[in-house]
Amino acid sequence: MKREKVAFLADSPFYTKRFAYYVGRRCETATVKDIAKELRLDWKTVNALEKQYMREKLRRAGTPRPKTIGIDEISIRKGHSYRIVVSDLERRRPIWFGGTDRSEESLKLFYEWLGPAKIKGIRLAVMDMWKPFENATREHAPQAAILYDKFHVLRHLNEAMDKIRKSEYYRLSGDDRKFIKGQKYTLLSHRENLSTDGRKALKTLLAANKRLNTAYVLKEQFGQLWDYQLEAWARKFFENWKASLKWQRLKPYEKFAEMIERHWDGIATFCKPENKVSLGFVEGLNNKIRVIQRRAYGLRDEEYLRLKVLTCMLPPL
């Protein structure tokens, strides 16, 4: 017996494609469980219909030919279990999700998937300072410039700032401690992002502790590094910033400066006009993935997570 294929039916013969796409659109803003309850369908049915919807979104988006890529990893469960996400920063969408960890071998899978012809088109690769990512990129896309993500660099600076805050807290005693306690967010945030009360607390804290005041000013100044158009001026700024650490007894900052020195080439790449790409997309994508994981209370179906990540920036059908 031969069954005739009907174009408007979904993968399941009990539902039309139109209904499957409706379910998929609803699942973009709600959980599978909620949609299953609303439509009085089995959870597995809703999950299967949403997968069909997401696969169709990927098909319509077409095969990527990226020129500027962003490489990052996400944790999919506790116990250092990672997957790599590669994004097309010009089209502002993730294009690959895979690997078994954050090793060179896992990232090589992306380059094998992309193919030699498309690899030649990559001119810039944005990543954190994780050596396996850089090694795999230099091996498979040697023509691509390496740029270290500004937000990952500043995260290391914030960690150094927090170590100074903790050391000051333990160094002091009595009433002197009260200005520091509970002010981690205040010190690590930019002044313009603080509320009125937060700015008052910051002003009081910086007036009460000279070392924290110096550390905070240096932290805020360092962000200017990415404003320079010429590497020579950026280098001069960094040398002056590093020189200002002398006699300040800010050991975490000194270690941070040594790290910047070791990775300078990947940071200075941003000074070239052709490399002035938006560096906030990868961080925004990570936040979106965390929302997806939180909404699902942990995802055990990795194929579902892969489709969710790859389609989260695509327009609805």
Image (cartoon, rainbow, N blue to C red):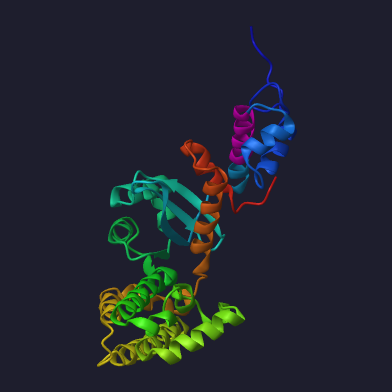
Q: Residue furthest top?
A: 1
Q: Nearer the viewer, residue 135 or 219?
A: 219
> Image quadrant for the N terminus?
top right
Does 225 lie within the magenta span? Answer: no
Q: Position of residue 231 (x, y in %)?
A: 37, 85
280 over 236 or under it: above or below: above
Q: Is residue 167 left or right of residue 303?
A: left
Q: Nearer the viewer, residue 287 or 63?
A: 287
Does 54 lie within the magenta span? Answer: yes
Q: Is residue 133 left or right of residue 189?
A: left
The range drawn in magenta is 43-55
In the rendered image, which quarter is residue 22 located in?
top right
Q: Position of residue 144 (x, y in %)?
A: 37, 65
Q: Could you tell me which residue is drawn at 49 percent across and 62 percent down?
A: 282
Q: Could you tell me which residue is drawn at 69 percent across and 27 percent down?
A: 41
Q: Could you tell me which residue is drawn at 49 percent across and 77 percent down?
A: 186
116 over 131 or under it: above or below: above
Q: Is the stretch drawn in magenta largely helix, strand or loop?
A: helix
In the rendered image, which quarter is residue 222 located in?
bottom left
Q: Nearer the viewer, residue 59 or 55?
A: 55
Q: Position of residue 48 (x, y in %)?
A: 60, 31
Q: Can residue 309 be seen in the rendering of this structure? A: no
Number of numbered discs overlaid on the protein picture: 0
In the rendered image, which quarter is residue 156 located in?
bottom left
Q: Can residue 83 be seen in the rendering of this structure? A: yes
Q: Is residue 123 left or right of residue 196?
A: left
> Image quadrant for the C terminus?
top right
Q: Nearer the viewer, residue 205 or 277?
A: 205
